[in-house]
Amino acid sequence: MPEADTGKVEKSFYTDVPQQSELFFLKGSNSYDWGMKNRLARIFDATSGKTVMLAFDHGYFQGPTTGLERPDITILPLAPYADALMLTRGILRSVIPPSLNRATVLRASGGPSILKELSNEHIAMDMDDAVRLNACAVATQVFIGGEFETQSVINLTRLIDMGNRVGMPVLGVTAVGKELVRDTKYIRLATRMCAELGAAFVKTYFVPDFETVTAACPVPIVIAGGKKLPELDALQMAYEAINQGAAGVDMGRNIFQSEAPVAMIRAVRKVVHENMRPEQAYEMFLDLKQQRA
Ligand code: R5P
């Protein structure tokens, strides 16, 4: 028998307490629908407002990259320390156990290999499949100033339209062609374009005066790690990026090509989520490396 509704006297209606409506914690994201926000909240930590994404999608155009020859062996031990994994659907299905329960950002563009013109990319995944795989976001590259600039921008906007239908955030990645200078003015242009065109967050490279890049971009920016650097330098770059407005890192080679990848991702987490100074995080890295953590 259902309980009879006996009226106001016996119930707690808290008539004097207004219902709270929280502002969503991520920059520029308050107007999204619930599903989009929920996906973003699985990528970004609601307490720190930041994310440590582990990028290992490099194989989609360059095959078995150094450190990614066997992602089952080299990446799986790192996965528990990442807030989100950035990868291809092929590696997700073939290597990542569904029980791992990490947020995923799926590479959704592709086409040319390193043997061809890289800007000639197309959308390379249906949104249905991203939903089927329970992705938290999908990513595509824009090649501003590149040979196929317009095509890559249209890939982004088409993916955003597809994503908006199902509540899937799109990560706009600013790629740099061989002939283009990766300076602050260029990065400001490319990141702002991604945001204006509707990307929910943007991935780019760390450059001087980075605070002008983050200030001019109305949605969160995460930085790519780029080529392998000495660990202290990579931690320093992460620290400076965070303190100049980045919402996290999407780091690959500086983690999985480190001499001690687990120690490195744990040190990166301290910098990103706790604003630990790079020198202290490096000490932690050395201690963990010695313990073979
Ligand atoms: C490159 O195209 C891939 O999308 C990577 O996700 C990206 O470059 C970040 O990786 P890394 O930190 O190694 O630069």
Image (cartoon, helix red, strand yellow):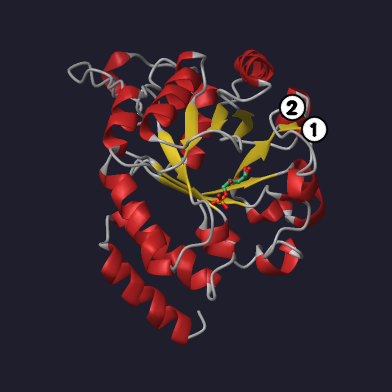
Q: Give SS at disc 1.
A: loop
Answer above or below: position of 66 versus 287.
Answer: above
Nearer-the-camera pick, 238 or 206:
206
Residue drawn at point x = 48 percent, y = 29 percent: 201
| Residue 101 picture location, percent across and down | 62, 51
154 left or right of 23 in image: right
* Nearest to N terminus: mark 2 or mark 1: 1
From this viewpoint, which residue is outermost toward the left? 16
Quarter of the image for residue 253 reads bottom right
Q: Distance between the residues labelled 2 and 1?
A: 7 Å
How many dots with numbers?
Answer: 2
Answer above or below: position of 284 versus 131.
Answer: below
Nearer-the-camera pick, 157 or 138:
157
- Between disc 2 and disc 1, the foreground one is 2
The quarter in which the N terminus is drawn is: top right
Q: Give SS at disc 2.
A: loop
Nearer-the-camera pick, 49 or 236:
236
Residue drawn at point x = 62 percent, y = 32 percent: 139
Residue type at the position of mark 2: Asn
| Residue 157 picture location, percent across and down | 61, 15
According to the picture, the residue beneath numbered tag 2 turns out to be: 120
Residue drawn at point x = 40 percent, y = 74 percent: 285
Task: Return the mark for residue 256.
Answer: none
The reply to whether discs 2 and 1 touch (Cβ–Cβ < 8 Å) is yes
According to the picture, the residue beneath numbered tag 1 turns out to be: 111
Q: Mark 1, residues whose alpha carbon is within 10 Å: few (<14), some, or many (≥20)? A: some
Residue 22 visible: no
70 left or right of 67 in image: right
Nearer-the-camera pick, 226 or 51:
226
Residue 204 visible: yes
Residue drawn at point x = 75 percent, y = 49 percent: 62
